[in-house]
Image (cartoon, rainbow, N blue to C red):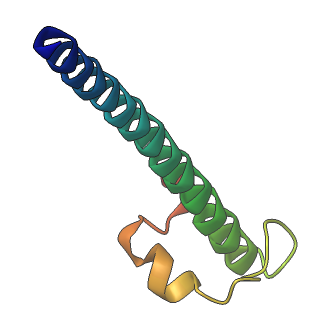
């Protein structure tokens, strides 16, 4: 009976470990996708500003100055 209890603990710990690893990998992928989307937004708003609205996107989130400060704002340097 005791071996069955220990085996259940081991199976539970292994299952929890696998779940946490998978959740961490998925979370990292989501984070990387969010960064890619943020960078694209910043580049498009910068292009919009450089072309006086002919190309790119307006700052529809109204957060360009706070979010995009960490990126190089020169579209030509992509």
Instruction: Residue 76 in the image: state x and y as whole percent.
Output: 56, 54
Q: Quadrant of residue 38?
A: bottom right
Q: Nearer the viewer, residue 13 or 76?
A: 13
Instruction: Residue 63 in the image: state x and y as whole percent.
Output: 58, 86
Task: Determine whether 32 is above or below 63 in the image.
Answer: above
> In the image, what residue occupies the spot 79% across and 66% down?
56
Q: Is residue 52 left or right of residue 35?
A: right
* Outermost residue toward the front in this view: 1
Q: Is residue 37 left or right of residue 8?
A: right
Q: Nearer the viewer, residue 14 or 50?
A: 14
**Residue 50 in view of the camera:** yes
Q: How many numbered marks, from 0 up?
A: 0
Task: Determine whether 58 is above or below 33 in the image.
Answer: below
Q: Is residue 12 left or right of residue 58?
A: left
* Outermost residue toward the right in this view: 54
The quadrant in which the N terminus is found is: top left
> In the image, what residue occupies the spot 54% across and 58% down?
39
**Residue 78 in view of the camera:** no
Q: Is residue 3 left or right of residue 42?
A: left
Instruction: Residue 26 in the image: state x and y as whole percent.
Output: 48, 37
Task: Determine whether 41 is above or below 45 in the image.
Answer: above
> In the image, what residue occupies the spot 36% across and 39% down?
24
Q: Nearer the viewer, residue 76 or 30?
A: 30
Q: Quadrant of residue 55?
A: bottom right
> In the image, what residue occupies the spot 57% across and 82% down?
64
Instruction: Residue 37 in the image: state x and y as whole percent.
Output: 61, 55
């Amino acid at each position: 009976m005791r071996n069955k209890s220990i085996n259940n603990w081991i199976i539970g710990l292994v299952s929890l470990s696998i779940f946490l690893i998978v959740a961490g990998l998925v979370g990292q992928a989501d984070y990387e996708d969010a960064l890619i989307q943020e960078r694209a937004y910043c580049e498009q708003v910068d292009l919009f500003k450089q072309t006086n609205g002919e190309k790119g996107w307006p700052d529809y989130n109204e957060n360009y100055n706070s979010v995009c400060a960490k990126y190089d704002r020169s579209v030509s340097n992509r």
